[in-house]
């Protein structure tokens, strides 16, 4: 910490911003904790993919705005049939992909059909399950007919997984992404940084930045010095530990404590013994002390949660009291499960600080009730394969940053291995409901079922700690979707 303070003092007069009379700068270096495994939002679950590419390089028919609202994007407007099953989209007519090819209705049909195909590798394939047919009416008109009404359909089309890609470039988007957005992909120095540059032929409002670099700075030991030295000018999702007060007191920076859609959970393999027993999962829930985890793994910032739902959502129910911290009750439940002497299990932890630090705390807490966890650190790519894809795990810790994603618990192949027909029925009804009051009630029912079943250890809502140069404006203060949208970002003179 002393070294960081010395750097701050030495840099006070020379860093961040331009001198009076000079034009505002047009480049930006942002820090990111995790490097994406590839650069195709339609073929991967990692949030880091969208954090670079969403709204910057790739666009969908709709987009999610900074307040979580649904906005037009490649679709200029749309009409919905009286029965709520048919959506007719009017497309923008002057759009080109970054390789110079024209965007039209055929690209929309290709993208939606590809996302919902039997062999689709889209991580959110369920978003498209309600689609029955996609019809090209003319080059600027697409008609999408649903199997049944879906109240969240326009919102779903705003996810990164629903961006429009072209058949010519889709096969190579993982390494050389080609979209329609205001920025074009420039370079990826693996293990270091990803660079995007302004698209001079963008159909919409031009961006102020000529160049943006997303640099990988994984932890406080690298993030704080990089900010203080001026190597990077912003970290939209910082993890700086006990250096937060120092950054808040430095007038050169703006520090914004915002919200995310990131439910941070102790992921549990519900079909793997002994976690297939409700009493075991309930015991773990009682053994967890959320406040200690938030204090130790999230700089004391974060809202405790008792189910998989964001406290910022109007349908949120505080269910943290379902299983209060109670070691005696936890031991009693383990005894009921025939595990009076406890048991051993593994805890696979991805590299993000909240997981690595939180894992140590949770391991200590569970040890107090006789559960001995072997901590296994894994890199992000290994976590995606071993835990998310292969379901080869007992417990893990991760933050699910997808927006409003409680429906993942109804997916039969999802890595939690959770199966409850009552929950599935609620989600099915939710998908058929457009009335907001009824949807709110259904969301509350879904939250209660997950809490009662102790499907996972529900820990806290991941906070968004944004730190950037005080002369920057336009970065999102909250994260309703996993994105670093640079379309409105500029330097002040």
Image: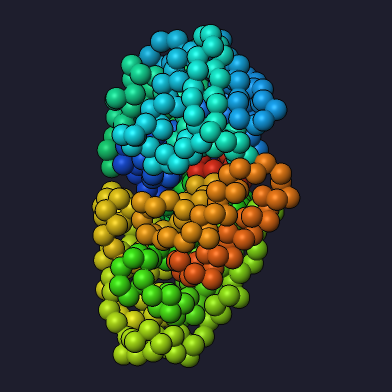
Quadrant of residue 364 in the image? Answer: bottom left
Q: Is residue 436 left or right of residue 263?
A: right
Residue 341 screen position, x and y as percent:
31, 90
Q: Is residue 62 left or right of residue 5?
A: right
Compared to residue 451, the image places residue 365 above or below, namely: below
Between residues 120 and 290, which one lies in front from this camera angle? 120
- Furthest residue toward right: 437
Query: In the rendered view, how is the structure colored?
Result: rainbow
Instruction: Please indicate, yes or no, whether residue 463 appears anywhere in the rendered image.
Output: no
Compared to residue 249, the image places residue 48 above or below, namely: above
The residue lying at 59 percent from left, 65 percent from top is 448
Q: Quadrant of the C terminus?
A: top right
Compared to residue 381, the image places residue 133 above or below, namely: above
Residue 294 screen position, x and y as percent:
51, 69
Compared to residue 358, the image places residue 238 above or below, namely: above
Q: Is residue 439 left or right of residue 334?
A: right
Between residues 311 and 441, which one lies in front from this camera angle? 441
The residue lying at 34 percent from left, 24 percent from top is 170
Q: Quadrant of the N terminus?
A: bottom left
Between residues 178 and 192, which one lies in front from this camera angle? 178
Residue 382 screen position, x and y as percent:
26, 52
Instruction: Please indicate, yes or no, whether residue 287 appears anywhere in the rendered image.
Output: yes
Report the label total. 0
Quadrant of residue 362 in the image? Answer: bottom left
The residue lying at 59 percent from left, 33 percent from top is 154
The residue lying at 51 percent from left, 9 percent from top is 139
Quadrant of residue 176 in the image? Answer: top left
């Amino acid at each position: 910490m002393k070294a960081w303070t010395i750097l701050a003092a030495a840099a006070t007069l020379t860093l961040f911003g331009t001198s009076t009379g000079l034009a505002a700068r047009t480049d930006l270096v942002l820090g990111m904790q995790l490097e994406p495994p590839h650069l195709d939002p339609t073929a991967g679950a990692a949030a880091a993919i969208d954090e670079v590419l969403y709204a910057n390089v790739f666009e969908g028919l709709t987009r999610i705005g900074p307040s979580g609202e649904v906005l037009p994007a490649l679709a200029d407007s749309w009409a919905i049939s009286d029965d709520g099953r048919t959506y007719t989209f009017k497309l923008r007519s002057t759009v080109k992909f970054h390789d110079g090819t024209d965007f039209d209705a055929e690209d929309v049909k290709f993208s939606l059909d590809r996302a919902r195909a039997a062999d689709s590798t889209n991580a959110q394939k369920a978003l498209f399950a309600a689609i029955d047919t996609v019809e090209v009416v003319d080059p600027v008109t697409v008609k999408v007919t649903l199997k049944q009404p879906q109240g969240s359909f326009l919102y779903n089309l705003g996810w990164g997984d629903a961006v429009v890609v072209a058949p010519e470039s889709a096969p190579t988007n993982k390494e050389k992404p080609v979209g329609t957005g205001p920025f074009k992909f420039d370079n990826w120095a693996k293990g270091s940084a990803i660079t995007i540059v302004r698209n001079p032929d963008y159909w919409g409002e031009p961006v102020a930045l000529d160049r943006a670099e997303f640099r990988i700075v994984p932890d406080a030991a690298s993030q704080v010095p990089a900010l203080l030295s001026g190597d990077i000018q912003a970290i939209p999702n910082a993890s700086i530990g006990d250096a937060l007060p120092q950054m808040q007191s430095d007038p050169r920076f703006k520090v914004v404590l915002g919200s995310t859609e990131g439910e941070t959970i102790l992921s549990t393999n519900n079909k793997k013994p002994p976690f297939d027993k409700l009493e075991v999962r309930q015991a773990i829930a009682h053994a967890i002390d959320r406040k200690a985890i938030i204090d130790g793994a999230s700089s004391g910032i974060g809202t405790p949660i008792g189910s998989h739902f964001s406290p910022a959502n109007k349908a949120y129910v505080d269910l943290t009291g379902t299983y209060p911290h109670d070691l005696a009750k936890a031991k009693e439940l383990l005894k009921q499960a025939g595990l009076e002497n406890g048991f051993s299990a593994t805890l696979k932890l991805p590299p993000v600080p909240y997981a690595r630090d939180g894992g140590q705390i949770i391991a200590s807490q569970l040890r107090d009730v006789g559960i001995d966890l072997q901590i296994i650190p894994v890199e992000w790519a290994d976590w995606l394969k071993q835990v998310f894809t292969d379901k080869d795990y007992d417990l893990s810790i991760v933050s699910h940053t997808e927006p409003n994603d409680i429906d993942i618990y109804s997916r039969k192949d999802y890595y939690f291995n959770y199966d409850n027909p009552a929950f599935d029925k609620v989600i099915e009804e939710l998908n058929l409901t457009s009335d907001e009051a009824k949807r709110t009630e259904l969301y509350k029912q879904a939250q209660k079922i997950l809490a009662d079943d102790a499907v996972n250890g529900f820990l806290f809502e991941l906070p968004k700690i944004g730190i950037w140069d005080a002369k920057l404006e336009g970065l999102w203060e909250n994260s309703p979707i996993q994105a670093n949208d640079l379309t409105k970002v500029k330097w002040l003179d």
